[in-house]
Image (spheres, coloured by chain):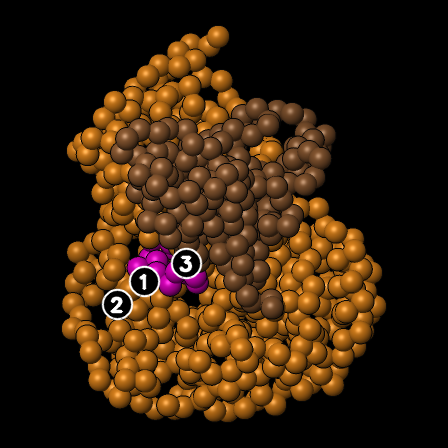
């Protein structure tokens, strides 16, 4: 279905100029699309910021959002992907009742099953850390809740990397530099 | 290393380096150092003191729209800056190159809610092409050059420079900069020959093609290329409101204006053609009406310089990205010469029908009170060939857009996207400075004139030779028309008691004449044009006149009505 809503991952590269994040998020706001997760970091290219954004939208809307983000003067490139086109990970922390961990044998089994690590144990609570794709993170959350073990839960925004060998944006910059020289303004 | 100068002086040097000859200005506390430096530049930069900062931005727009050069407004922080928001938004929606420079508190006070501090960059980011805070004098040459490059390249638009007080005061060794390239920004994409070839194929195959020409043709200086294209392909043209002067009104392939109060023929034929070729226009809802019924039978080619416009409102079959001056020329070169006589002839009966049902009575009524259309028609007939018009928003805008005859490019300046009442008078002031050799006529209504009526003071002082044609119907007429059509004639807040405009004109020392009678119309218009400098011609028009034809809200474009 063309108009079915899906979770898309946007990868945006921008110059390191103040206010770009604000401009990007306002495009989502105007189109009434909620950002599910957002991660901003340095990229593999010096001086260039990389945003990884996830949002539920239909394909028509997401392509409009992407072209409006790319239109911003200081945005180098904006691309969107479905989950099968990228490698992605999130980190989640689960604070659970230590009592459940000791009394319910299923608890440690579940934690092992998901490849999660216990990074803190004290008499009142323990902290479990898991890195993985969104689906697994949510599934572990569900299982721990079902055991009535969960006290707190937090997950990071998604980070994603494309299946291409190098960043598409490097090719773009090379192309621009070859036309105009590398004097960026 | 050159001599050190203040940041404020560096700003002015940067502006002079960019070729700025006019500033629309209003001073205040956080920009006072810049005004102090302006005092030394009274001979090299014209400085027009407006009476409200909103008018400074509209004047900058009028200047830019008529000349193609970037208009500049300079204002203080806080309320001075917030008063520019309407003009900035207007320039964004109508792709107008302006740079607004606003004072700001010192960097040490930023974020403290200091006196007249607002987060201007935060406020203007969604309504500008670029918005930047200059926090150090070192930044000035770079920021100004970048601002002008961004404002007036590719699809033009407004840029805001938020100029902190410390950056104005600091000393800096000024070195001129000229930015011609930003790697994250491709203002003019290279044409893709595959798209060109595909367009040629579609155009060659079409038997009922229709061109929709918009503001982009004017912004891209592609009027000649458009004319060559339509003449070779024998393709009729509908123009958008902002594209009205891209083709002379009397060109045989000009079929009129598109949209809600446009002409019947191009609107109806939009839903009969087999190929729509949209050039530098964005399928605004005033043009398309309900998109579910819009040109469903046709294939659509969209030529635009802004990729984000493709498929935004209307699905298209082919997008041709690039500067239409280049893409149109490439297509024209490759396409077949054609004749579509039957097709172009098929527009004529609708033109005749509209003339019989609407135009004749609107422009040449035999009796009754003065009509807006006949005033516009008289002004148009007696204006010289250099004339350009600005309009306010509402009935005056629709009547002048419909009945003024356009003879050359860059002749129609109006607020299309934002629909800003109060735009007409200040934009006309700006236009007189952007094209001092042209006659500038401002069509306005009693509502719109009063929204920026203080600018009569600017005219008084600068002697800007604006010919103001006030179409006074004692109503907020366009809203009243909607109330009549859709709200059972319940005229809520639309009848308006007017002041005596002759006394106002006299107070400002502006020659003026009021007419109510048809017999005086021609002599009054002649008097207006014969008078040196500004003039106010008040025409007391029929109170409850409607602009027709009309596509009622939600109707398909081919279902226009001629009477309520």
Residue B119: give x, y in percent of width and height.
29, 38
Q: Is residue B229 above or below residue B298?
A: above
Q: Which image quarter is the C terminus of chain A in?
A: top right
Per the image, label 1 sits on a secondary structure element best described as loop
Q: Which residues, given as a range, are shown in magenta?
A: B415-433
Q: Colour of chain B?
A: orange
Residue A117: give x, y in percent of width and height.
47, 33
Q: Are marks 1 and 2 in contact (CB under 8 Å)?
A: yes
Is A142 positioned to the left or the right of B53 in the image? right
Judge whether residue B56 can be spotted in this image. Answer: no
Q: Which residue is mark 3?
A: A32
Asked whether residue B245 is drawn in magenta, I would say no
Q: Is residue B563 above or below residue B65?
A: below
Identify the subunit bearing mark 1. B
Instruction: Kindly identify which numbered label has been placed on residue B447.
Output: 2
Identify the subunit bearing mark 3. A
Q: Which chain is brown?
A: A
Per the image, label 3 sits on a secondary structure element best described as loop
What residue lies at 27% left-to-right and 45% top-to-bottom? B82
Q: How many marks?
A: 3
Judge whether residue B285 can be spotted in this image. Answer: yes
Instruction: Kindly identify which numbered label has been placed on residue B512.
Output: none
What residue lies at 62% left-to-right and 44% top-to-bottom? A86
Q: Which residue is mark 1?
A: B421
What residue lies at 31% left-to-right and 29% top-to-bottom? A122
Check if mark 1 and mark 3 are on a common chain. Answer: no
């Amino acid at each position: 279905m063309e108009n079915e809503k899906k979770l898309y991952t946007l990868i945006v590269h921008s110059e390191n100029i103040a206010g770009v994040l604000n401009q990007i998020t306002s495009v989502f706001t105007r189109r009434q699309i909620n950002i599910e997760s957002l991660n901003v970091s340095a990229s593999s290219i010096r001086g260039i910021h990389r945003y990884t954004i996830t949002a539920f939208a239909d394909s028509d809307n997401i392509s409009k959002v992407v072209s409006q983000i790319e239109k911003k003067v200081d945005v180098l490139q904006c691309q969107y992907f479905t989950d099968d086109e990228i490698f992605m990970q999130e980190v989640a922390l689960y604070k659970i009742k230590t009592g459940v961990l000791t009394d319910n044998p299923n608890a440690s089994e579940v934690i092992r099953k998901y490849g999660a690590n216990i990074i803190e144990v004290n008499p009142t609570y323990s902290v479990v850390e898991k890195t993985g794709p969104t689906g697994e993170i949510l599934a572990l959350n569900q299982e721990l809740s079902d055991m009535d073990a969960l006290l707190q839960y937090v997950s990071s925004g998604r980070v994603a990397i494309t299946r291409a060998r190098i960043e598409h944006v490097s090719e773009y910059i090379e192309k621009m530099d070859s036309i105009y020289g590398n004097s960026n303004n | 290393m050159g001599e050190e100068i203040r940041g404020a002086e560096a700003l002015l040097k940067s502006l002079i380096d960019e070729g700025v000859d006019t500033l629309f200005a209003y001073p205040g506390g956080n920009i006072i150092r810049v005004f102090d430096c302006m005092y030394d530049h009274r001979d090299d930069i014209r400085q027009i003191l407006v009476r409200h900062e909103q008018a400074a931005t509209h004047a900058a727009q009028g200047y830019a729209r008529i000349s193609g050069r970037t208009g500049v407004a300079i204002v203080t922080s806080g309320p001075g800056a917030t008063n520019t928001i309407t003009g900035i938004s207007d320039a964004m929606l109508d792709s107008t190159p302006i740079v607004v420079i606003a004072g700001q508190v010192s960097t040490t006070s930023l974020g403290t809610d200091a006196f007249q501090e607002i987060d201007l960059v935060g406020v203007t980011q969604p309504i500008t092409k670029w918005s930047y805070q200059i926090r150090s004098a070192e930044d000035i040459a770079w920021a100004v050059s970048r601002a002008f490059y961004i404002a007036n390249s590719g699809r033009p638009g407004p840029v805001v420079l938020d100029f902190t007080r410390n950056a104005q005061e600091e000393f800096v060794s000024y070195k001129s900069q000229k930015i011609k390239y930003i790697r994250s920004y491709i203002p003019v994409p290279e044409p893709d020959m595959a798209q060109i070839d595909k367009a040629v194929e579609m155009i060659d195959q079409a038997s009922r093609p229709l061109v929709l020409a918009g503001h982009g043709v004017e912004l891209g200086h592609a009027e000649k290329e458009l004319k060559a294209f339509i003449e070779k392909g024998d393709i009729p043209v509908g123009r958008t409101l902002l594209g009205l002067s891209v083709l002379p009104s009397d060109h045989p392939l000009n079929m009129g204006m598109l949209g809600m109060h446009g002409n019947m023929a191009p609107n109806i034929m939009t839903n009969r053609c087999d190929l729509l070729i949209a050039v530098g226009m964005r399928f605004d809802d005033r043009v398309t009406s309900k998109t579910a019924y819009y040109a469903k039978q046709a294939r659509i080619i969209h030529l635009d310089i802004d990729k984000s416009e493709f498929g935004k409102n209307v699905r298209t079959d082919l997008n041709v990205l690039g500067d239409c001056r280049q893409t149109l020329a490439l297509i024209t070169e490759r396409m077949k010469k054609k004749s579509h006589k039957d097709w172009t002839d098929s527009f004529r009966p609708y033109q005749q029908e509209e003339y019989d049902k609407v135009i004749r009575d609107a422009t040449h009524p035999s009796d009754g009170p003065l009509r807006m259309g006949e005033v516009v028609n008289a002004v148009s007939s007696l204006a010289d060939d250099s004339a350009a018009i600005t309009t306010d928003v509402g009935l005056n805008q629709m009547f002048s857009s419909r009945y003024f005859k356009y003879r050359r490019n860059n002749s129609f300046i109006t607020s299309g996207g934002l629909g800003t009442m109060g735009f007409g008078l200040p934009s006309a002031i700006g236009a007189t400075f952007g094209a001092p050799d042209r006659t500038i006529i401002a069509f306005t209504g009693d509502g719109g004139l009063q929204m920026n009526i203080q600018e009569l003071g600017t005219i008084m002082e600068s002697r800007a030779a604006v010919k103001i044609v006030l179409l006074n119907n004692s109503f907020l007429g366009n809203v009243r028309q909607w109330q009549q059509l859709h709200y059972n004639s319940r005229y809520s807040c639309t009848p308006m008691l007017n002041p005596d405009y002759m006394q106002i004109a006299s107070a400002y020392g502006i020659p003026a004449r009021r007419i109510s009678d048809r017999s005086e119309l021609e002599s009054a218009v002649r008097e207006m044009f014969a008078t040196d400098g500004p003039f106010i011609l008040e025409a007391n028009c029929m109170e409850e006149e409607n602009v027709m034809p009309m596509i009622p809200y939600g109707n398909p474009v081919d279902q226009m009505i001629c009477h309520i």
